[in-house]
Structure formats: C-alpha cells, structure tokens
Image (tube, helix red, strand yellow):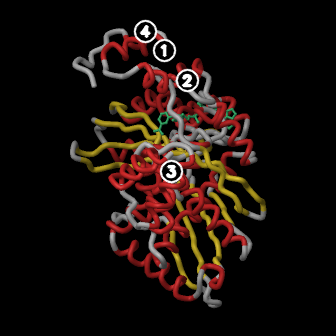
Amino acid sequence: MTENSELRGFYKLTMGERRQLLKKVTSLSDDEIKILANTGGLPAETADHMIENVVGGYTYPLGVATNFTINGKDYLVPMALEEPSVVAAASNAAKMARVKGGFKVTNTGPVMIGQIQVVNVPKPEGAKAKLLERKIDLLKKANDQDPMLVSLGGGAKDLNVKVLSSLKGPMVIAELIVNTGDAMGANAVNTMAEAVAPMVEEITGGRALLRIISNLADRRLVRATAVFDRETIGGGDVVDGIVYAYAFADADPYRCATHNKGIMNGVVAVGIACGQDIRALEAGAHSYASRNGRYKPLTTWEKNRDGDLVGTLEMPMAVGLVGGAARTHPAARANIRMLGVKTAIELAEVMGAVGLAQNFAALRALASEGIQKGHMKLHAHNVASSAGATGELIDIIAARLIEERKIRFDRAKELVAELSKEK
Ligand code: NAD
C-alpha cells in the first residue's frame, strides 16, 4: 500500500535503489523486500533488461508431466503454474492415452497475419484492387525488413485485403501473411507491417493507422487427436459421460468457458515454462473459439465403433524458439532442452497434445467422481501451509483435514495451534 504512486524517475534507478524506494513508500518489511528481490534462476541483470521498473523476480513451481508420447516420440513436459492437480492430471491422462498409441498431432505451419488499417480511403473497393495488383512490390518491401527470416525460408508470402464496414465507416485492411519460421513472430510481423504502411497509403490514398500482428492466429493451428481405451479410462459410462460433458460445453458458453480454461491449464503451464507469450496464446485460443460468432469448445469428444473415446483439439498455437523469453530466460532455455523440441512447430504440437490431455483429465474427473476429490488433497496441503503449518506438520494437518472432510482455513488454524503445542 502506498499514499502516492507517482514515483518520478523510478525507471532510471537501479534495481536495488528501486527496492529501497519501494520500502520507503510502502509498508513492506525487510523480509518481504528480500523475497521480492529473489530472481531465482533468472540472473537479476537479465530480468532488469526484460521488462521495465524491475525490482526482483517471482517464481512459480516447475513440475514435469510424465508419460507423454506424441507422434511416436516420448516427451517429459515442463509445466510452470500455481494450480494444484494440473501436472498430475496431465501425466495421468498421457498414461491412459499411451494404451492406444498416444497423441497424434499435425500443424498448419508457422503462419501469422500482420494487419495494416487504412482509413479515409476515397474508393475502398478500388483501393483493394490496387493493393492486390501491387502484391509483389508490397511483399518485397516486407521481406526486405528481415533477410534473416527470408534466408531461412520464412517471410511474407501473401497479401489479403478486405474492406470492413465499421462504426467509423468503411476502412481497408491489408493483411500480410507471414511465415515466421521458428519465431513467434510478433516483432518480425509488426516491423514488416510498419515498413509497408507508407506504400499502402500511397497506393490507397488513405491514412495507415494501426500496423500490428493479429493474435487470432487461424493460419497457425495445431490439430491433436488421441484414442482413449474404454476399459482403461473406467468403462462405457465414463466414455458416455465425457461425450455428454462435451455436448454441454458445445451448447452453453458458461460451461464452455470452463471447458476451454481446462485446456489452457496445460497450454499456458508449458507456455510459461518455455518462455512463451501466454497472453498471445490465450487471445488466440478464445478468439478462435468464437470465430463463428458463438463461443465453442476447442476440443471435440466422440465414441468410436469400438466404444473407445476419441478426442480432438484444434486451436491456434503461436509459439517460438527464437526471440522473446524463450531465448533470454535461462530456465525457459533449460525447459526447452528438457522437452527436446527442435522447432517451433514441434513445441506447438506438444502444447496441443498437453491441452487435449488436460481437457480429457478434467472431463473424466467431472463425469465420474467429480473434480474435488483429486483437487482436495493438494488443496489441503495448501490450506495447512497457509494456516501456518511447517515441515512435517503440513502432511499431518492435511491428512486430518481430509479425514475430517473439513478442508477449511479455520480448522487448519485450530490444528496448527493444537499440534504445535503438543510438539
Ligand atoms: P524476435 O524479433 O526477437 O525474433 C524473431 C527474429 O529472429 C526474426 O525476425 C528473424 O530475423 C530471427 N531469426 C533467427 N533465426 C530464426 C528462425 N529459425 N526462425 C525465425 N526467425 C529467426 O521475436 P518475434 O518472435 O518476432 O517476437 C516475439 C515477441 O514479440 C514476444 O516476446 C512477444 O511477447 C512480443 N510481442 C507480441 C505482440 C502480440 O502478440 N500482439 C505484440 C508485440 C510484441
């Protein structure tokens, strides 16, 4: 808490100086400042260059999901997140998927869209035609910005032009279709969009305003599928239950939001562990889910002729191995090595498989014993620990909370008081 948030020149201070000032203007204790100062596996200097006004670091637990076999190859999957049960659920789902050969994943290539908005265009439809006529020149201008990407086989490959009728009247949108190779591509595409904008203005006679990548990466999809053996997952009722659960999500956006959130539990956790822009992943996922005007599940679940469960996932997956934190964060680099992926599309495919696994695990729990049983064990540990239990007391109190079916903070506090005295 602070009385005045106007800290002039804060950005010019060193990390240490920023912390000192922070201590002065807030009620943070020395211990709390020390906790915030810790940058974990990320060197302080690197952190200071990654974002602005850096005062320290913030660490998530890093778990490793086991059992994944994807396109015939085994992977150990690093996952960084705060939510209990996700890593266990992914590992368990992957184990069940192995019975029928694991996950099969394909992708549509690393293709992103860069948009240039042009307003005040005298003849929008005519301007569209003119832009398309000059496609070769526009693509050349875009590609001149990134010889490195072009030399690797990427670059601007196509031009799309549309006329939108908007709140502010018609506007022309020129879209660069860019193969971004092993990069997520936002910087690369934004640079291209900015560079071609003056040419677009000249051709259309309008004014170029926004020049930026679209996070609705519908040309950069992953498609994952897996067959789950009926007996392995608990029988025909579980198969039917999951199909019903999917039908619920398909029919109701309130349920669907949580259905897709479960997918993102896996996608985002791997994304964080591997230094990806998870805001871009979230934006891509949810905009794709509503691309036809209604919010829909990113997965489908069906029963096949043998009575087994077949799951499929289709969603954008804009990830990269060069650029961004994937390159600068040493823990991200180590996690990418643990995973052993060699290209951005391989990382995208792994993340698609994890998303499908996560969704399966959640639906299976929901359609059988309910989600809380699995969740509560870890939750009980968190409750015990936040009530002040330390060391072996955490396990003892968590077990008592579960046994008493009272996984509540007030009860944990009582137990901490009681058992600490005994000790
Ligand atoms: P980048 O610009 O750091 O790296 C990409 C560049 O690396 C390419 O342009 C190319 O010149 C070079 N390169 C070298 N080897 C390559 C290879 N094998 N494949 C492809 N390129 C190779 O990073 P980026 O991926 O263009 O941008 C990603 C960053 O942009 C992320 O950190 C993201 O958070 C940020 N960002 C996102 C948005 C958004 O999503 N809306 C907007 C702005 C910035």
View quadrant of ligand 1: top right
Q: Disc 3 versus disc 1: distance between alpha carbons? A: 37 Å
Label 4 beta carbon within 8 A of ligand 1: no
Looking at the rendered structure, which numbered label has been put on residue 12? 4
Question: Of discs 4 and 1, which sits in the foreground?
Answer: 1
Label 2 beta carbon within 8 A of ligand 1: no
Label 3 CA crowd tier, 10 Å (few <14, some 14–19, many 20+): many
The answer to which of 93 and 170 lies nearer the viewer is: 93
> Residue placed at 51% from the left, 50% from the top?
394
Q: Position of residue 142 (x, y in %)?
A: 56, 33
Position of residue 230 in the picture relative to residue 60 (left or right): right
Label 1 beta carbon within 8 A of ligand 1: no
The amino acid marked with disc number 3 is: Ala
Secondary structure of the residue carrying numbered label 1: helix
Tag 2 near tag 1, CB within 8 Å: yes
Q: Is residue 172 visible?
A: yes
Tag 3 near tag 1, CB within 8 Å: no
Question: Of discs 2 and 1, which sits in the foreground?
Answer: 1
Looking at the rendered structure, which numbered label has been put on residue 47? 2
The answer to which of 169 and 98 lies nearer the viewer is: 98
Looking at the rendered structure, which numbered label has been put on residue 217? 3
